[in-house]
Image (spheres, coloured by chain):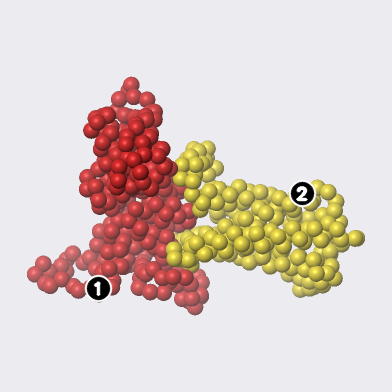
Chain colours: A yellow, B red
Amino acid sequence: MNLSAITLHVPDQSKIAGRLDFVMVASGALLILFLWAHLLLVSSVVLSPAIMNALAHFFEATYMAQVGGPAIFVVMVVHFILAARKMPFEQGEWKAFVTHGRMLRHKDTTLWLVQVISAIVILVLASVHVFTVLSDLPISAAKSAARVQGGTWLSLYLVLLPMAEMHVGIGFYRIGIKYGFISSARRAWYQRAEVVMMGGFVGIGLLTLARLYWLSI
Amino acid sequence: MNRKLHIKIFRYNPLDPDSRPHMQSFHINEYDSMTLFIALTQIRDEMDPSLKFDFCCRAGICGSCGMVINGRPGLACHTQTKDLPAEITLHPLPVFKLLGDLSVDTGTWFRDVGTRIEAWVHGNDAAFDPAAEEVRMENALAEEIFELDRCIECGCCIAACGTARMREDFLGAASIARIARFAMDPRDLRSDDAYYDVIGNDQGVFGCMGLLGCQDVCPKHLPLQDQLGIMRRMLALHSVKGILPKAVIAALKHKGHKGCCHEKH
């Protein structure tokens, strides 16, 4: 009989810590790939609204939007809960981390706070975004343009875009570090790549928003 | 050269009820190849004999003189004043128990984590034959083990770790590199399960947030980043054995000897 299920006096021999860590990292990697793909697909409107409409139609005809959309939302929430285990929600932890960051003035340490804050912003704003888009299918360039031109939505996207890109950019680098895919010899190269990618994707995003903003409906 | 150094030192004696934490300024003349250790010794000899700071070897071997130098944990004896601005601020290492001024107790902390991770070779004691010749080891492997054994337990990696500062029970880079040293050692007969039991938790490898303060301050330049990655991947994959297809685990697995080695990728 496994007594660790009944009393905490018996140490748990389960593999749960490693599995949760693996799920945290794997869900993070999946969300990174999703977000990059998502942004590139939406940016097709820059080339032509017809291309964006055709792509949207493809994802709806194959039910990838109807099933995949909510699935990605669930993955995001699971990823948040797993990663939030590390967040400094207690005031003492927050104080310790901020004091530490101020003392060390160390880029990777500071960027972690950026990840924590952006995570909470993304959780709220992306939920709003997902709900709105998925409750009003099909997706079309005209509808997206109407939203962006409608005032308050533009401000939401102008916050969500850089937050999301920063979060996945830093997250991409940190997964590589934590699991040893990025070696110390190549760390500086990946740090530069991280910045270039973030800038690039924010740039594509802004271009897309601009195109939608000035698209005649 | 020959600058006038302004050294601001944290002063506090926790055992004295009248003592209040404060910063005290000292001004000394810099000279060629002066280290921070020399500067502190001069201050203690000539200005204030009550100044507490630890030292022993003066050569970066004993790990006693770790302190926070202008915000960065480092060894006083390893730090030349010419590499610092003329104004130098010194604090005791965080995380560890403060003994007074710049002196902290790293020993109790390291003894505690050493016990928790069982930092000794787990051999088959019953089969040990004191008369037999020692088992030989490949030189390349011995060098890899020695690379991690160079740790002097100065505590700089712990003091530079945001996770260790938030969570008291976090084992830190030194402990994880230490267990890696045993994982590499063929004389240590522990199974992957046994290593998992001691560091496969949120106080060990899975608690690390990849901030890499440890890697960036280690005065002995231990390969902490690479080693943390190797151990975390090894134990995470161990935990999903039987769940993920074998081919996926094999593809993700770190290539090379168990717990080893550092490559460029």
User: x, y percentage for residue B117?
Assistant: 32, 55
Q: Toward the viewer: B168 or A61? A: B168
Structural crowding at the residue carrying mark 1, measured as other residues with C-alpha within 10 Å and reported as few (<14), some (14–19) or many (≥20): few
User: x, y percentage for residue B128?
Assistant: 15, 67
- Chain on which label 1 sits: B
Residue marked by disc 1: B139
Q: Toward the viewer: A151 or B169? A: A151
Residue B8 sits in quarter: top left
- Residue A155, label in figure: 2
Does residue A171 lie above or below A155 as drawn?
Answer: below
**In this orientation, does residue B24 appear?**
yes
User: x, y percentage for residue B182?
Assistant: 29, 63
Q: CA distance from mark 2 to mark 1?
A: 62 Å
Q: Residue at x 32, y 58 (%)?
A: B178
Does residue B164 lie above or below A50 as drawn?
Answer: above
At label 2, the amino acid type is Ser
Q: Toward the viewer: B42 or B22? A: B42
